[in-house]
Image: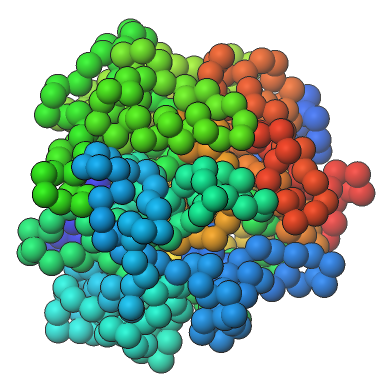
Amino acid sequence: MLPHGMRSRWKKITSFASATALSAIAMAAPVHAADPDATVDALTTATPIKHLIIIVGENRSFDHLFATYVPKREDERVHNLLSEKIIRADGTPGWNFSKAHQFQITSAPNGGKYFSSADLNQKTLYGVLPPPDVGGIGAVSPYAAILTIPGGDPGLPPPDQFLFGTGGTGLAFTLGPDTRITNVTDLPPGPFQLTGPAMPFDAFTGDTIHQYFQMVQQVDCAIDAEHVSPSNPTGCLHDLQSAVTTTYSTPPTGTPHDTGQTMAFFNMQHGDAPFFKSLADQYTMSDNYHQPVLGGTGPDSQPLGFADQVFFSDGSGHPATPAAANIYNPDPQSGTLNLYTQRAQWFNCADDTLPGIAAITNYLKALPYSVQTKCGAGEYWQAVNVNPAFTPKGLVQTGLVVPPTMQRSIGDVLTAQHIPWKYYGGGFDADGTTSPFNGSYCNICNPFEYESDYPAMVNDHMRDVTDLFTDLANGTLPAVSYVKPDGTMDGHPASSKWSLFEVFAKNIIELAQSNPEQWAETAIFVTVDEGGGFYDSGFIQPVDFFGTGPRIPMIAVSPFSTGGHVSHVYEEHSSVVKFIERNWKLHGTLSDRSRDNLPNPVQDDDDNIYVPRNMPAIGDLFDLFDFDHGPQH
């Protein structure tokens, strides 16, 4: 499913190709102040880190990117498709390919009710993987018109603008098997290498489903002998990725078009994702960092600000009830295995009598540790992306929205403690203007935009990424910086491509490194909002009703995180909040229920190193750094 507004964005960029010219990128010359960030430097921190930058791309699981990655250091290990022998280095099936087998649903797993797991007698191994689909991608790049706009997209340097014109399918059709994929109609029922002779790394490819109820089913978690093992005590098999995408809805064409692409992976040993490979080789990455909830961009972006989700309220902090048409019912329609009755926006997980809820809460109650569902009475939570109540510039937004919340964010705490912070969003300056990039800003990605006092935040805290470039060059970074590219270059399948996100992140990292004094006290987290529905083989630890979910990439780029180390500590986006709280010595947590209350994981040095002994537990990302030996160069 494309991000909100993406289809209209393609048309808008094309129609404005000959409109008002945009000025070319011109990085500001550094100012010659003695110490332009003296205020930030003076803040008390637990580490030498005075500047934190969080760069967030879109929709790629850990195995999707790092399937064949081999650590540069021989004393390091990584859990991926290659190390698990699910695939070989050349991308073909390995000895343990069956560990990633995909099954189709053949009988109703829950007696006509929503199911969260399936037994072996209710599913059958696919003969071949349902063919990955083109998914609406055109023969040429949807952003080719950007090349005709003077200056192009201001979020990228001029040498990288050519990427907007590459990556189209070259095919005469936009639905049906993506014939660029080798053996697309005869793939084994498991992970497959996306790239090949006809499919370059720099290509637009089909999207896949990534919403709450669908992802619960895709990961197929249960506490029984068929699911649980010592290394997988929560029993998540990840074996219904393709089955769910072909059963939860009936597309307008009557033919499923969200199918086997969930199992796609890049091959770093064959040159795919080269910048992320270089970052992993040089710095510290995690192979146990997770999307915080099962679901999409909006719900998975909120924990970056709240370490929590945002519920449907009356605007004054009290629970409210959405209209009936906006309440989700995932129970299958009569006579179907999994065709949802009503796909909508909100669900109440505090009431087991409501559709879809009991199956999940029964699983959580069976876990070998205690889990609080975090489902308050009468509270409705997002199942899908829903726009915040305000526009990027702080105006009231019309239509279906998340009512403004009174929940406290890390931004509120930083502001109260006089610690400078900013959210830099690509396309922010274009919002509400006649620019061809109006609408490219991702409003569901900004967690602070859900707050009731967001309009008052705009002047001091909301900026375009072009302002980040200036702050990096001038040495005027705030203490904490959130960074989101516009929708053309966020790496989201179909509406973007990973090559564009790589050059976006590369530009920011190189700008940060170009100022040695500032770089010496800077850390950059590079991650994504969520896995986009792509398969991942990692362990999943539920900590409440909403997740966590599958693993996603996370790399810490800093003078204090060099050497190619791989951390195995269980973490997710709420860990960013924990890092900020610990590093800037902030007291307390955001709320009584937020995940920054969870302890750091306690690990065993054995095969269960990925499984915290003290579940539920979430780390604070300090494990990604070595502050004992000073900055490394």
Residue 111 visible? The answer is yes
Relative depth, front residue between 470 and 445? 445
The answer to which of 172 and 569 lies nearer the viewer is 569
Scheme of image coloration: rainbow
Q: Residue at x 73, y 51 (%)?
A: 608
Which residue, as the protein is rendered here, is positioned at the far bottom? 197
Left or right of residue 395, residue 468 in this image: right
Query: Which x, y percent locates residue 139?
Result: 21, 79
| Left or right relative to 36: residue 295 | left
Task: Name, please, the residue furthest toward the right.
Answer: 629
* Residue 536: percent from left, percent from top: 50, 60
- The image shows residue 156, relative to residue 362, as above or below, that is below
Expressed as whole percent of the image width and height from the top left, the position of residue 208 reads 31, 60
Please state the horizontal and vertical placement of residue 362, each as a whole percent of the image: 43, 31
How many labels, in total?
0
- Relative horizontal placement of residue 447, taking residue 575 as reference (left or right): left
Q: Residue at (67%, 51%) from the top-left corner?
A: 230
**Quadrant assignment for the N terminus:** bottom left
Residue 400 to residue 248: above or below: above
Residue at 52% x, 23% y is 372
Q: Is residue 157 visible?
A: no
Which of 520/183 is in front? 183
Q: Quadrant of residue 253?
A: bottom left
The quadrant the C terminus occupies is bottom right
Q: Quadrant of residue 618?
A: top right
Identify the residue at horizontal 42%, vertical 43% (top origin). Answer: 294
Which of the two residues, 490 or 15, is positioned nearer the viewer here? 490
